[in-house]
Image: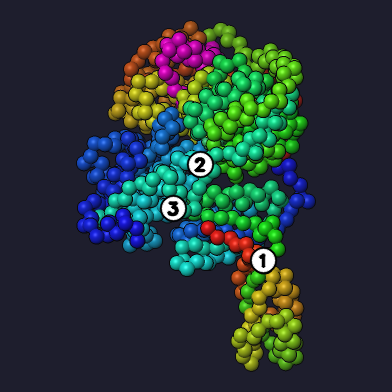
Amino acid sequence: MSATSQHAATQPLTMSGAEVVLRALKEQGVEVIFGYPGGAVLPIYDAIFQQNAIRHILVRHEQAAVHAAEGYARSTGKVGCVLVTSGPGATNAVTGLLDALMDSIPLVCLTGQVPTHLIGNDAFQEADTTGITRPATKHNYLVKRSADLARVVHEAFHVARSGRPGPVVIDLPKDILINKAPYTEAPPAAQPHRSYRPVTSPDMAQVRKAVAMMKQAKRPVIYAGGGVINSGPEAARLLSDFAHLTGFPVTNTLMGLGAFPSQDPQFIGMLGMHGTYEANLVMHGCDVMLNMGARFDDRVTGNLAFFSPGSKKIHADIDPSSINKNVKVEVPIVGDAGQILAAMIQVWKEDSQPPMREALAEWWRQIDLWRGKNCLQYVQQGKIIKPQHAVKRLYEITRESGRETFITTEVGQHQMWAAQYFGFEKPNRWMTSGGLGTMGYGLPAAMGVQIAHPDALVIDIAGEASILMNIQEMATLCQYRLPVKVFILNNEYMGMVRQWQELLHGGRYSESYSEALPDFVKLAESFHGVGLRATEESQLDDVIREMLATDRPVIADIAVAKDENCFPMIPSGAAHNEMILGPGQEGGVAGVTDEGKVLV
Amino acid sequence: MSDNLENFRSATIAVLVENEAGVLARVIGLFSGRGYNIESLTVAPVDEDRRLSRITVVTSGTGMVIEQIKAQLDRLVPVHKVSDLSLAGPHLVRELALIKVVGSGEHRVEALRLADAFRARVVDATTESFVFEMTGNADKIDAFCNLMRPIGLKEVSRTGAVAIVRGSSALTV
Ligand SMILES: Cc1cc2nc3c(=O)[nH]c(=O)nc-3n(C[C@H](O)[C@H](O)[C@H](O)COP(=O)(O)OP(=O)(O)OC[C@H]3O[C@@H](n4cnc5c(N)ncnc54)[C@H](O)[C@@H]3O)c2cc1C
Ligand SMILES: Cc1ncc(C[n+]2csc(CCOP(=O)(O)OP(=O)(O)O)c2C)c(N)n1
Ligand SMILES: [Mg+2]
């Protein structure tokens, strides 16, 4: 028995399990919990009532609590914290947990559970929460002994934030919360976990191999993803340093936007299904690819058989299971993106071999030709507002305002237009559901961002269908006076679905029309927020300006062209060099095979 | 996946895990959730104070898939070590089987003769049945069962493979 547990065993216990939980949260630096009460977690609510250190934000649906914690975590780099009750509280949280798992967002979610002696009896509001959430979390715990409680909470935070971050559930039976429990402090950071020890510092031999390969590159590319953001702002700074040192072009995944400044001349835009012409052709034609914290997602690679056929690939990732999962690479490097970039910079500078300057200049001439295609151009003519134009004006006007701006999105075409037309210069300013693609993510995520950054401008770029999936959170915004702006690109369609039906299913628009929509202006007002509307191009700027000037929650309903498609697009099953461009621009083939249709 | 089927192989993987609730469910869930094959899986605590369990899983897939399986196992929080015995060098694989054969007359004599040849032991006998115990690799047990089938094979209970590397190197935490 260790000294501390001996001490705990002999001292009379004074704290309830619920108090132990709160104290451990406090020690872990938690300032805010997003939650919703119920019978099984009443002891924690009682403890929350009797303290001031941790603020509780009462959401209106448990899914929203998790997305709010995701927004909080993604915009601060801290672990987001959630509290829900047993049974339906826990099951409502599952979508959010899986969303966080897919996008590597650090969360700790406390779920209530029936008392230990009732587990397995189909008790009231019992659910096998650890069973249900096992494939939706990085790890989960069911606390069955009071003596384990404090240790488990500390460990959960360590697991959530270290290595590849992710959500962790702690299932807390009610008797464990009520009974007295010993408190133990978090183990010192230097003390390793018994079995879980993620690798963060890279193997220098691999780094040297990678640098040698990059020095020889004639047509290189840096493909940077969400891992750079996970690593922290320092990694993004080092990414810029490394890009400037090498002169290589940089593309970002959807999850990586902001990891490299959009205004940097070396930025060639997002890549993948709705990425830019230049980014995808660079990926297709490169001879050396540096993947920095991205996971070769199918939205990015397109048809694997034709993915970047002529390149040697370096993959830097903190999770060994991301490496060689979809794409076989020549040089794997396991470690933290920031540490790997720092090592690469050092080795690049030490190495006397000069880079292929001539070839690189030729590569940039080619890239500039592709850029000249101007693949994101659109024509804004007449009264009808083009959705691309709405996002572009939103971007320009917020930039002029000079305010710190955070963008969240829902899922659909509007999400892609936001990614294409809104520029990010810093990490942690862009929050979107990439891996799971969860409609209903953006509004609660914006709520979490605004809690963490009360003075910033926080905008959810939304679709009229998605926004209805967590619209109840308008009440939370109004309760806490969170001036989140909801900017709806209202095309009266589940536009992304409509687009696929147009391109792949003969224009049979099966169940994709947004029938019977609410009046969003009145809807905002009914929640005690502000409703604005633009139906013509001439009103757009005024509505955006008024929205930005309003210090309350706003829904701005922007009526946009109903049948606009999102381009460029690499159809499912196609290769990068077969992308479809917008009307009036020639691109690759548009034919989609049945094999392609099978893909999502 | 740029891996071709020529790379398809079978692998015997040993996993040292914390002996805690749910750990087996995590491992099995990983295989079913990601569509990996499980040919057999065995588990039991292996240290003095029963804090560690050793799982032996026999699986198959392309080289890329097997690497993925190992990486996925290794990132589970309660997993200490993952070792691909198929790559670790010469190793022993054993399985225990209890095999019930029911019959009379000539068949009984033939069953005992075969059992002797395969070094299977009789661990239970009645006037119309035998239970044989045998250890060996899966092929040997398969062969024995196939021979017993026409003679009255009624029931088989097998443990699945356990395995260990030959020589002095050891898989410990
Ligand atoms: C409608 C829709 C359309 C989409 N279209 C596109 C598209 O056109 N283009 C596109 O790019 N995406 C698109 N996506 C998103 C896509 O589905 C994936 O979510 C995204 O491509 C994954 O980004 P990522 O590769 O950066 O990986 P992430 O999901 O961000 O994963 C991060 C990777 O980095 C690793 N990592 C984590 N922390 C660290 C660290 N500290 N150091 C090093 N590595 C670390 C992780 O192990 C992981 O492998 C779309 C999504 C939707 C919903
Ligand atoms: C919860 C959930 N259900 C279904 C989908 C499939 N889906 C993806 S985009 C989309 C339509 C979104 O419509 P809208 O919010 O209006 O956005 P738009 O594409 O029109 O911009 C649907 C139904 C999803 N991503 N998430
Ligand atoms: Mg829509």
Q: Which residue is mark 2?
A: A163
Pointers 1 and 3 in contact (CB under 8 A)?
no
* Image depth: mark 2 or mark 3 in front: 2
Whether the residue under disc 3 has CB within 8 Å of ligand 1:
no
- What residue lies at 64% left-to-right and 71% top-to-bottom? B95
Q: Judging from the image, what secondary structure is the residue with disc 2 in?
A: loop
- Horizontal and vertical percent for residue A572? 67, 33
- Quadrant (top left, top right, bottom left, bottom right) of the C terminus of chain A: top right
Residue annotated with mark 3: A130
Q: Amino acid at mark 2?
A: Gly
Q: Quickly name the residue at label 1.
A: B166
Tell me which amino acid carries mark 1: Arg
Q: Which residues are drawn in magenta?
A: A384-409
- Distance from disc 2 to disc 3, alpha carbons, whole Å, reads 22 Å
Q: Nearer the viewer, residue B114 or A23?
A: A23
* Mark 1 or 3, closer to the camera: 1
Residue A271 locus on image (x, y percent): 63, 26
Q: Residue at x 49, y 12 (%)?
A: A396
| Mark 2 / mark 3, whichever is N-terminal | 3
* Disc 2: residue Cβ within 8 A of ligand 1's nearest atom: yes
Looking at the image, can residue A123 be seen?
A: no
Question: Same chain for the residues at labels 1 and 2, yes or no?
Answer: no
Q: Position of residue B63 (x, y in %)?
A: 71, 50
